[in-house]
Amino acid sequence: MTTTVPAAHEAAEPAPAADRRRWTALAVVLTASFMDLVDATIVNIAIPSIQRDTGATFSALQWVTAGYALAFAIGLITGGRLGDIYGRKKLFLLGMAGFTLASALCGLAATPGMLVGARVLQGAMAALMVPQVLAIIHVSFPAHERGKVFGMFGAVIGLGAVCGPLIGALLTEGDLLGLQWRPIFLINLPVGIAGILLGRRFITESKAPRALRLDLVGTALATVGLLMLLYPLTQGRESGWPLWGFVSMAASPLVLAVFVRYERAKARKDGSPLVELSLFKVKTFAAGVGVQLTFGAVSGLFFLIWTLYMQLGLGWGALHAGLTGVPFSLACSAAAGISVQKLVPRFGRKVLQAGALIMLSGALLYIWEAGHYGTAMQSWQMAPAMLLMGAGMGLIVAPITDSAISEVPAEHSGSASGIFNTTGQLGMALGLALSSVAFFGVVGDTGEAGAAALGASFIDATTHALWWVSGGLILVFGLLFLLPRRVRAQHPAEHEAPETGAGTERQQPVLVS
């Protein structure tokens, strides 16, 4: 994945004083990325504990995860532009302070509604903090050092993917001070406070010389249109699918159509729309966005049902479930590294298509195992399906961005990358919303008379939802045919574009939700 920096920054070498300080600044921003990434993975493993402690409904549990993803996605591009306009250090520190405060509110939440509200705030603050990370790295390090620095960034991403579920499991099952699930959020407080103090001292301020203007109207229209679709989809089952829900979902495309018209007018007026619609004229980019949206939905749905299946369906503890996920994370990380370094340069898009088929085989194997073993399923029996799912995902998530934006004009590569990764976050929010139909609807329709019946209902629901996952993977496989056979080799200078904020994003978002 690529982020961009103005040419003026490219030529400037850090001053000797900055040379000593920038490595501390790097440690601060990498810690922030790790904190954000772990927070996404930690929550899924703690959902059963949250439900037991707060009495949260299934729809509230969906919003605990979907609210974060939706707020993060909607604010991602705007957060990057705010950093370009007002200063990346300023927005990073503001985002980290807000993220830390929201984490405290999550840990202290007394009701499911308070927790959902705090998670939405947490996602919005992450949208201010995360886009600044790669931009700060770009302006703090000369070009010849960025390879090493981005290698460290990638290692942090991989470490977060593996450690997140385990940290969540240890904190939840450890029941520190009788707080049950709350330490998964409260652990952010000392880390966040230390990051703010060190960031104020060691991060150098920077702005983009030609930053785009904010598009607040576009952001509002996109937010309303998406909420009109996702809210009734998430809440409808619990409310008995009322008429207003169907009216809202039917009207959502109309609001999004108004958004598109406004963005076109905004582009003609001042050239600073929230979404650069001209990018969708590049067929490979449009297809890539379709892949990212579908794959994000598949991933969001799978990770939620997988956690609930292990803990509520099979009755496993949080630590047992967390350790069971280690083969998935390791396979995903290994396959991601091999795909970019060895396979994609030689075989092109066939690697991504192979990843979709490998994931599909893992989902089908999982369906068979769930039906065959029932509530007697053991971790070692689940491992083959998890290795296939993880390896397949790794073959897709690492190269997909470069494949999708390879034919985008170089001057728009930053905007394309930002839009592309925002789409992945929206896909995850959509997948979490769809779990209301694909998973929770089956749980609710299957008897709840006793633990055995409840366990069986979760197995039935998991099998049903995995068929949805399989259908999504088939769609992903088909859409991948629209990507270029080979990624066009680009000169390093081609990756430089005016706006850094629009092109900064969280790496491999679908890996950890």
Image: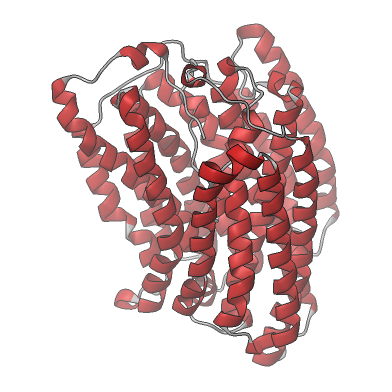
The percent coordinates of residue 372 (x first, y second) are 74, 85
Residue shown at 35% from the left, 49% from the top: 100
Does residue 368 appear to the left or right of 343 in the view shown?
Answer: right
Residue shown at 39% from the left, 64% from the top: 184
Farthest residue, direction front: 346
Whether residue 108 is visible to the viewer of this picture, yes or no, is: no
Does residue 377 appear to the left or right of 135 in the view shown?
Answer: right
The percent coordinates of residue 240 (x first, y second) are 80, 64
Whether residue 456 is visible to the viewer of this picture, yes or no, is: yes
Above or below, 283 against 422 in this view is: above
Q: Which of these two is toward me, 386 or 299? A: 386
Residue shown at 72% from the left, 32% from the top: 484
Does residue 296 appear to the left or right of 84 in the view shown?
Answer: right
The percent coordinates of residue 37 (x first, y second) are 44, 51
Q: Which of these two is toward me, 396 or 459? A: 396
Residue shown at 72% from the left, 26% from the top: 259
